[in-house]
Amino acid sequence: MESTHMTLVGELADRTTWTADDCSIDGTMRVLGTRSAMLIMREAHYGTTRYDDFVQRVGITEAVAAARLRELVAAGLLERRPYQEPGQRTRHEYVLTPAGVDFQPVLVALMQWGDQHVPRPSGPPLTLHHTDCDEPVAARLMCAAGHEVKPEEVTVRSTRR
């Protein structure tokens, strides 16, 4: 069977001599490692901004929504902005920050993986299309030169010296 894993080089090649204590994936999961946080981010990318709409569209309790929104604001993915409807008290909406916008490829990759590996009898519930040309949108692993890269073509190097 062909290799499908990344290649660890240098000090990383001997897995018994190092641990991933400062792992980027671990850090990301500490911020977004709950179902509710991921679905709030999905909704924010779909244009949801209001607290009550997050509660309803994600299907979570108000307490969970409040906690997750607070965490996502603290992590810098959402920004809390005041707004006021005529005759109403000031409330807050939640909008994506630049870091939150940068999370979109992760959501696309999760959606794509789910469409391929969590089959539904009626097929994928949504499809993504490029607005300009209407072609499907997909997440791809690519190098900076624009080449599509297979998992076995990735070399992992430490940035620590």
Image (tube, helix red, strand yellow):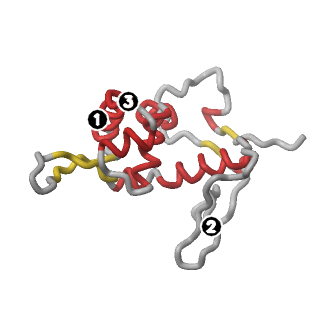
Q: Which residue is mark 3?
A: 61
Q: Could you say which is closer to the camera, residue 153 or residue 64?
A: 64
How far apart are the alpha carbons under marks 2 and 1? 37 Å
How far apart are the alpha carbons under marks 3 and 1? 14 Å
Q: Which residue is mark 2?
A: 146
Q: Which residue is mark 1?
A: 70
N-term-proximal mark, 2 vs 1: 1
> Which one is closest to the eye, mark 3 or mark 2?
3
Q: Is residue 148 left or right of residue 90?
A: right
Which amino acid, mark 1? Arg
Which amino acid, mark 3? Thr
Callout 3 secondary element? loop
Q: Position of residue 22 (x, y in %)?
A: 46, 30
Which amino acid, mark 2? Gly
Looking at the image, which residue is at 45% across and 40% down?
58
Q: Residue furthest top?
A: 16
Q: Is residue 77 left or right of residue 14?
A: left
Tags 3 and 1 touching, CB below 8 Å: no
Identify whether 36 is placed above or below 151. above
Q: Position of residue 35 (x, y in %)?
A: 50, 33
N-term-proximal mark, 3 vs 1: 3
Question: How many numbered callouts?
Answer: 3
Identify whether 130 is placed above or below 124. below
Looking at the image, which residue is at 32% across and 27% down?
63
Q: Is residue 93 left or right of residue 7?
A: left
Residue 123 seen in render: yes
Callout 1 secondary element? helix
Residue 161 seen in render: no
Tags 2 and 1 touching, CB below 8 Å: no
Q: Position of residue 160 (x, y in %)?
A: 48, 37
Binning the other alpha carbons within 10 Å of mark 3 as few (below 14), some (14 to 19) or many (20 upward) gives few
